[in-house]
Amino acid sequence: MAPTVKLVAVDDTASSLELVAESLQQEGLTIFTSTDPEEGLDLVFREHPQIVLLDLVMPKMSGLEMLERIIAFDPAIDVILMTAHYTSETAVEAIQKGACDYLNKPISIPALRSRVERLLADARQRKRALDLDRELLETARFEGMIGRSPLMWDLFARIRRVARHYRSALITGPTGTGKDLVARALHNLSPAASGRFVTCNCSAVVETLFESELFGYVKGAFTGANADKMGLFEFAHGGTMFLDEIGDMPLATQAKLLRVLQNQEVTRVGSVTPRKVDVRVVAATNRDVTEMIAQKQFREDLYYRLAMVELGTPSLAERKEDLPLLEKFFLERFAEQFDKPIHGLTRRAQIVLARHSWPGNIRELENVLGHAAMMTLSDILDVEDLPLSIRGTESGKAEAAGASPAPDASASLEDHERELLTGALERAGGNQSEAARILRISRDRMRYKMGKYNLR
C-alpha cells in the first residue's frame, strides 16, 4: 500500500476548494481545506503536509505571505499558487520565494491533476526513502555504534574477528569518535563478557597515584595507607581493563604495565608478593603513538605489546555518508529524553550540518543536536535551532528574520521554552497567532504552551 500523503488547500472561495478536493480525491491522499489563511497556516503547522495549494489573492493574508511562512516552516513542502490575476512578475516572485508551480484560474482540472500526481509521486518516494532509512538505522547498529560507510563496516568486521582471541588491544583515533564504544564492543563479544568492564581515564589520574590506583597497595605502604586496597587490575579479574588516554600514562607506570601484560600478575605497592590476574587489556589514545615513541614519551615495547591488535576509529569527516543515520539516531533519543515530538530536520538544516567539518566528531554532533532539540518548539529542527557556531553565515539570516536568541544553556528545558514563548509574544505585540508563526507552531499548540507556563 502506498504511503499516505497530506495535501492542504487554502482558498477564500469555498466552491473552488470543493472542486479541488473532489478532483484530487484518491486513495493514499488526505486532503485538508480552509477558506481562512490563518487557519490554513495552522493546518500546515499541525498536519505538516507534503503539498500545499494556495490562492494568491485572499483577505487578511496574501498567498505570497503564506508561501513565505510555509517555506520558513519547512522548505521541503511543495507549494502551488493559484490565481486569476496572472502576471509574469508575480510568477517569478513566487518561484523565487519557493513555490514549485504557478497556475492560472479557472483551474484546468487535467493540468492540476497532472501536476499534483507528479508531486505525489515525489512525496511518496521521499516517504519510502524515510521508511528505508528507519530500517537501515536498525541494520546499521552494532554494539551501540551506528554506521554503514565502508570504513565503519570494516571496523565492525575487525572487531568481530579479533574479539574472541585478543589479550590486549590498542584503539586509536581522534577525540569524540567512539573509542570507548569500540572497547566496550570488544569486551561484549569476548569470552570475558560476563566479567567486569573496568575503566581508568589515565588523563584524570594524578601521576603519583597511578601505581596505587592500578595495582593497589598494602597497609603501611605510605602515609595514609591504613588498610590493604585492591587495584583496578585485580578488580577487573576475569573481565576487561580499559585504559583510556593511555598516552598520558607516566613512563614508570608504563614499565610496570608491560610486566602485567607479559606475566598476567600485579604487585601491590609496598608488597613483594605478585598476584595472578586474568585480565584483557584495551588501551585507547587520540595521540600519535609513533611520534610519542620518537620523543621518548611512550615505551616502544609497550606499544608493540598493545598493538598486536590495533583498531582505528575514523573521524566523522571521513564518514560523512553516515551523517543522516547519526542525525536520526540522536534525534530519536533526544525526542524521548525531552519528551518532544521531534520528527527530523529541515532540508536546509541538513545542508548546514553536511557542510560543517565536525572537528569534535560524533561527540560534537551529539551536542549540537541535543542543543537544537532542547531549543526548538517545533517538531522539525531548523537552522535557527542550531548553535551559532554551526550556523555560521546562516546566523545573520536568522537574526534578520527575527529568530529567537538562544536562552542560557545552563537553564532547564522549561526555562528555555518559557523564554522562547515570551520572546515571541513580545515581538508579536501580544498577538498569539503571530507569535505562533514566529515559533513555527500551530495556534493550538501555542495556547497549550501559554497555559502550561501561565503566560497571558
Image (tube, helix red, strand yellow):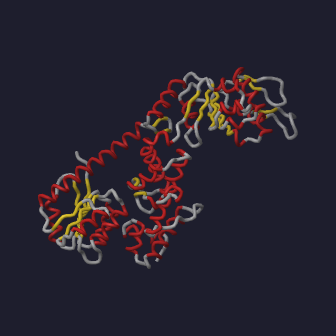
Residue 302 location, quadrant: top right
- Whether residue 396 is visible to the viewer of this picture, yes or no, is yes
Residue 232 higher or lower than 112, as above or below: above
Tell me which residue sits at (40%, 56%) in the image: 348
Residue 356 higher or lower than 139, as above or below: below
Percent position of residue 295, x then y = 72, 33
Tell me which residue sits at (52%, 45%) in the image: 362
The residue sitting at the front extreme is 89
Query: Position of 297 compared to 106: left or right?
Result: right
Quarter of the figure that contains the N terminus: top left
Residue 41 location, quadrant: bottom left
Percent position of residue 377, x then y = 44, 63
- Whether residue 32 is visible to the viewer of this picture, yes or no, is no
Percent position of residue 238, x then y = 64, 26
Residue 368 higher or lower than 294, as above or below: below
Residue 54 higher or lower than 354, as above or below: below
Tell me which residue sits at (40%, 75%) in the image: 432
Instruction: Decide which of 197, 440 is in the foreground and name it.
Output: 440
Query: Position of 180 compared to 331: left or right?
Result: right
Tell me which residue sits at (54%, 45%) in the image: 361
